[in-house]
Structures are given as structure tokens and as C-alpha cells.
Amino acid sequence: MYSLDPSQGADIMESFAINKETGWITTLKELDHEEKANYQIKVVASDHGEKVQLSSTAIVDVTVTDVNDSPPRFTAEIYKGTVSEDDPPGGVIAILSTTDADSEEINRQVTYFITGGDALGQFAVENIQNEWKVYVKKPLDREQKDSYLLTITATDGTFSSKARVEVKVLDANDNSPVCEK
């Protein structure tokens, strides 16, 4: 007959059960790698001796593997940047950053996309030197539009989150004066 040693902590007794006949150990609740990655379960095996019951103990090591169960979160809701209308394409407007509570590196890999506010494709977001940067892709004209509100989506392949990038276009002396008379 199998049983869990009752002297173990409540986290073991509330998280696991054992089949008395087969010794099959099952979970009683969902386990989370970020809360606790390893458990050591003390199992008692007892025989059915009529005169003398003998028992033995063993430790079962349980490792909880990480799954992608946490979304990436931007470190700011709104990023702000400025660019002069006469700056050449390639100027960085904002450096984006996210955090992800998942433990394993593979579950924390995040990709960024511009998902709104850039109908003409004037901006881009790329991983440059291990930083995600929003930059100007095409020349801007302040007289046509002096600000943009971009929506950026970050995804780890399962979950996503959004942030905004406010872009203010600064004026440059790029228009010749007009003489009316």
C-alpha cells in the first residue's frame, strides 16, 4: 500500500495524491513553474503483513517544466519620440522594451509589429543590436502631418500586448518664402 508521508509540508499534501494500490502519483491542482519549479515527495510503501507490517520510504523528485503561460508586458504604455521632417530615414524614434514572467528563454522571445497608425508604411520596427527600435522608414513632411500615433503589438507566439508610440514631427526650414505682390 502506498501513501504520502503526512509529515510533509502542506504544499505537497495539497498538490499531490497517490493511488494506494498502484503508487501512481497525480496532481490535485495546476502547478506553475514560476511559483515552484521542484517538489520532493516522500512516499511510504507499506506491506500487508499480518503480524508485522513493514514499510519503506522513497523520495520522488518532481520537476515542473515551464510553459508559455505569461504574456509579454511593455515597460511603458506610451512611448514618445520626435523627429525633424528633414531627418533622413533611419532615425530612431523609440526603443521598446517588454518583460515576460516565463522562466525559460524560449518562452520569453518577443517579436514586435506596427499594427496601427502607419497606413503609408512610413515607420518600421526592428531588432537592432539586441534592442527593438521604432524608426523612420520614409521621409516625413510636417506640413502634411505633424504627429502620428502608432500601435505596436508585442507577441511571444501565444500571447500579445499593445503599446502606443507618439511621434511628433518637428518643423524644418524647408519651404521657400512666397512673395504675394
Image (cartoon, grey):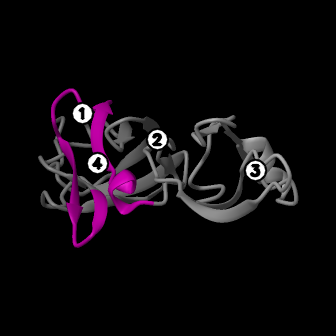
The residue that label 3 is drawn on is: 4
Q: Which mark is residue 144?
A: 1
Image quadrant for the N terminus? top right
Secondary structure of the residue carrying tag 3 is: strand
Which one is closest to the eye, mark 2 or mark 4? 4
Residue 19 at x, y percent in the picture: 65, 35
Which one is closest to the eye, mark 1 or mark 3? 3
| The one of 107 and 131 positioned closer to us in this rendering | 107
Secondary structure of the residue carrying tag 4 is: strand
Instruction: Give the mark, 1 or 4, whose residue is nearer the N terminus.
Output: 4
Taking 28 as reference, is 119 left or right?
left
Image quadrant for the C terminus? top left
Local crowd size for mark 3, using a 10 Å CA cut-off: few (<14), some (14–19), many (≥20): many
The amino acid type, in three-letter code, at marker 3 is Leu
The amino acid type, in three-letter code, at marker 2 is Ala
> Would you identify the image quadrant in which residue 114 lies?
top left
Instruction: Give the mark, 1 or 3, whose residue is nearer the N terminus.
Output: 3
Residues at discs 3 and 4 in contact (Cβ within 8 Å): no
Residues at discs 1 and 2 in contact (Cβ within 8 Å): no
Which one is closest to the eye, mark 3 or mark 2? 3
Q: Which mark is residue 163?
A: 2
Q: Is residue 142 magenta?
A: no
- The residues tagged by marks 1 and 2 sit, at their Cα atoms, a distance apart of 25 Å
Residues at discs 1 and 4 in contact (Cβ within 8 Å): no
The residue that label 4 is drawn on is: 111
Query: Residue at position x 82%, y 46% from top?
Result: 50
Residue 142 at x, y percent in the picture: 27, 43
Q: Is residue 105 magenta?
A: yes
Q: Which residues are magenta?
A: 104-133
